[in-house]
Image: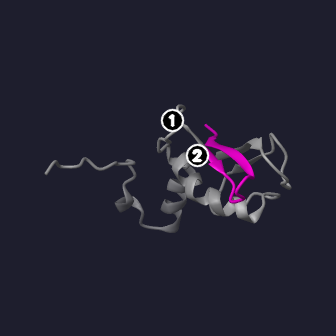
Amino acid sequence: MDRIEYLNLEIDFDEVKSHADYKEIWKRLSPVKVKMIEKNEECLHNLSDSFIYDNHYDKPKGICSALHHVLQLYIWRASLGFPSWEKDRNTYRIHCPDKKGTVWEVKRKI
């Protein structure tokens, strides 16, 4: 059986001895921008609407709860630079939970 070389995000969690240490690592997470790129039916959001996730736990003001729920799976991936399946490996294209709904582009802000 081949040995797998596991991904290393180069964060030494042994260095985290306090809440202040944790917050220093947290500052290194990239903000993520989410932008609507396709609208297929009625939605409270409009084409080109965008939101910034500065804090990955907080829901940006104005974003609908259903979309926020779906995006939570990808905000972390984008922030950490985990490659997507798209041609542009830095961008995820995510469909909202409505069966026709909207398509959103998710990418690191920096």
Q: Quadrant of the C terminus?
A: top right
Q: Is residue 83 visible?
A: yes
The residue carrying mark 2 is 30
Q: Is residue 109 magenta?
A: yes
Position of 37 compared to 11: left or right? right
Residue 61: name its quadrant: bottom right
Q: Nearer the viewer's eye, disc 2 or disc 1?
A: 1
Dot 2 amino acid type: Ser
At x 35%, y 61%, the residue is: 14
- Disc ID at residue 3: none
Most extreme residue toward the top, as rendered?
A: 87
For mark 2, give the secondary structure: loop
Q: Nearer the viewer, residue 29 or 78?
A: 78
- Residue 26, position in %: x, y? 54, 56
Q: Nearer the viewer, residue 53 or 11?
A: 53
At x 53%, y 63%, the residue is: 20
* Residue interval drawn in magenta: 93-110
Mark 2 and mark 1 residues within 8 Å of each other at the beta carbon: no
- Residue 25, position in %: x, y? 50, 54
Q: Is residue 12 magenta?
A: no
At x 29%, y 50%, the residue is: 6
User: How many C-alpha atoms fall within 10 Å of the one at disc 2: few (<14), some, or many (≥20)?
Assistant: many
For mark 1, give the secondary structure: loop
Please tell me whether residue 43 is drawn above or below residue 58 in the rendered image: above
Please tell me whether residue 70 is drawn above or below residue 1 in the rendered image: below
Looking at marks 2 and 1 on the same chain, the residue that comes earlier in the sequence is marked by 2
- Residue 81, position in %: x, y? 50, 43
Q: CA distance from mark 2 to mark 1?
A: 16 Å
Position of 45 compared to 90: left or right? right
- Residue 88, position in %: x, y? 54, 32
The residue carrying mark 1 is 89
